[in-house]
Amino acid sequence: MARDTLHGLHRASRRPPAAKTPPPPGRAEAERVEAVLARLAEADPDPKAGFDRTDPFRLLVTVLLSAQSTGPTVSRVAEALFATAKDPAGMLALGEARITEIVRPVGLGPSKARNIVKLSAALISAFGGAVPASSAEMRRLPGIGRKSAEVTANFAFHEPVIAVDTHVFRVSNRIPLAPGATVDAVADGLAHQVPARFKDGAHVWLFRHGRDICTARKPACPRCPVSDLCLWPGKAA
Ligand code: SF4
């Protein structure tokens, strides 16, 4: 998973422009959303290849490290950290000061190290050192927000939730699939709009579509596989 992490995941702090004309509700709109997902699924039928044996604790910590950092740096730092400590007990033994030194390159090192220690202690005291299998339980852990919990639950446990990072947020508003002004609104909209059969892979498809094609500054509309289904007024011909 080190090569194609989700983990250039920046926070979705900036709002992309929403489509000026909201699509009509109803069946036609549901069919358009389904067609977008079907198109992305067809192009990438095994979106989680290589991620299947992900260690939930490592994934949770990696996503925690990814806030406001880039994927390659996060992967490198996570590699270094987990070469030293592999589980919550190991993190506690390593200690906050040493963890801070290791994770400093990803930025916000002291607060991330503090959260890793708190998270490890909570996992040991409440779950016997294991990561709980549901995103709802993960969200009660220190330092773990909705996105981190849903990425981990989706990848490690195949929970059918669609985590919203900056890429998923942008494409969901542009195409649109589930327009919304906040990450929570988009996540709730996707949960409602995306057919069940696409939910397990939807985060990866939308993340990759936003990262590789529908980029923030210069979307590659001429080679976009869903351009005929996209209603964004700013799309290129
Ligand atoms: S047509 Fe352009 S704006 Fe629409 S989804 Fe494709 S890349 Fe994004």
Image: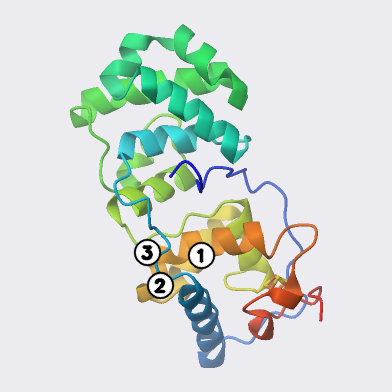
- Give the labeled residue for mark 2: 198
Q: Are marks 2 and 3 in contact (CB under 8 Å)?
A: yes
Find residue 205 and name its label. 1
Of tags 2 and 1, which is closer to the observer?
Answer: 1
Judged left or right of residue 25, residue 149 is left
Q: On the rendered structure, is 73 left or right of 188?
A: right
The quadrant holding residue 234 is bottom right
**What residue is rendered at 42% in x and 32% in y?**
61
The residue carrying pointer 2 sits among few (fewer than 14), some (14 to 19) or many (20 or more) residues within 10 Å by Cα, namely some
Residue type marked 2: Phe
| Badge 3 element | helix
Q: Quadrant of residue 69?
A: top right
Cβ atoms at labels 2 and 1 below 8 Å apart: yes
Query: How many labels sit on residues?
Result: 3
Is 84 drawn above or below residue 148 in the view shown?
above
The residue beneath circle 3 is: 200
Q: Secondary structure at mark 1?
A: helix
As drawn, the residue found furthest toward the bottom would be 28
CA gap, disc 2 and disc 1: 10 Å
